[in-house]
Image (spheres, rainbow, N blue to C red):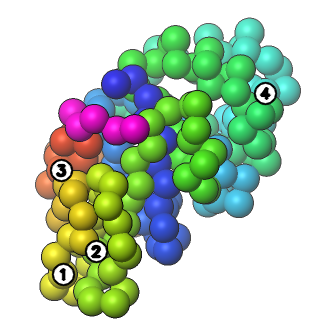
Amino acid sequence: MPALAVWTAYDGLLSAVAPLGLAAAAGTALVVDLDPAGPVYPGSGSLADLVADGPRRVDLVPGRNGVAVLRNGGVAKAEAREVIDALLIGWPHLVVRVGAPDIADGLAPLVPVWPLLPGMLAPTVEMQCVYQRTGFVATPPGPGPVLPRPRPAFLAGLLNGTVARHSRWVAAWREVWRLPWH
């Protein structure tokens, strides 16, 4: 599957790092932030720049090995659709960060990511999700892979632009690429 959309509920930190982990697990991937209210990822290029220049400039982005991030810059799905379609042609894997699950409709299969919380804090979920272990002992409320807790230093590195592809956390994300998502 060349593209997946990631949506994370209730956790700002997880919302910022989950797309990076999924992209790192693919090896070579582009993270496109389609959430105008999301984190400001580091870097000089943005989705807004590509939308303003049109899809003819999309060919300037591919050709990189590893993880690249395209910040949002204030672009909504309707404005970005043509550019995202062009990016799908040039990249082996595309991870689209969305701020709401319905934004992924017609764009890429949705991968919901939930922090694994105990008891009444756990969501009622029947669809397949990715669950992120937290400091609590809890059982996943539905089907899907459970990620190990990443170390704080690893998370700090991710947020500063350093992607360590050989971590247990990134390795756990590899399963997500192999699962059927709808």
Vertical side of 32 occupied by 89: above or below: above
The numbered mark at residue 51 is 4
Question: Residue 61's quadrant in the figure?
Answer: top right
Q: Amino acid at mark 1?
A: Ala
Do the numbered discs 1 and 3 sit on residues whose CB atoms are within 8 Å? no
Q: Nearer the viewer, mark 1 or mark 3?
A: 1
Distance Cα–Cα, label 3 vs label 4: 33 Å
Distance Cα–Cα, label 1 vs label 3: 18 Å
Outermost residue on the right side: it is: 52
Do the numbered discs 1 and 2 sit on residues whose CB atoms are within 8 Å? yes
Q: Nearer the viewer, residue 34 or 16?
A: 34
Sequence-first disc among 1 and 2: 2
Question: Crowdedness of circle 3 by 10 Å Cα count: few (<14), some, many (20+)?
Answer: some
- The residue identified by callout 2 is 116
Horizontal arrangement in the rendering, residue 153 relative to residue 16 (left or right): left
Sequence-first disc among 1 and 4: 4
Q: Amino acid at mark 2?
A: Leu
Distance Cα–Cα, label 1 vs label 4: 43 Å
Distance Cα–Cα, label 4 vs label 2: 36 Å
The percent coordinates of residue 147 (x first, y second) are: 21, 60
Q: Amino acid at mark 3?
A: Ala
Do the numbered discs 3 and 4 sit on residues whose CB atoms are within 8 Å? no
- The residue identified by callout 1 is 138
Do the numbered discs 1 and 4 sit on residues whose CB atoms are within 8 Å? no
Question: Residue 153's quadrant in the figure?
Answer: bottom left
The residue drawn where x is 80% and y is 18% is 54
The numbered mark at residue 172 is 3
The percent coordinates of residue 58 (x first, y second) are: 65, 16
Tag 1's secondary structure? loop
The percent coordinates of residue 122 (x first, y second) are: 33, 80
Question: Crowdedness of circle 1 by 10 Å Cα count: few (<14), some, many (20+)?
Answer: few
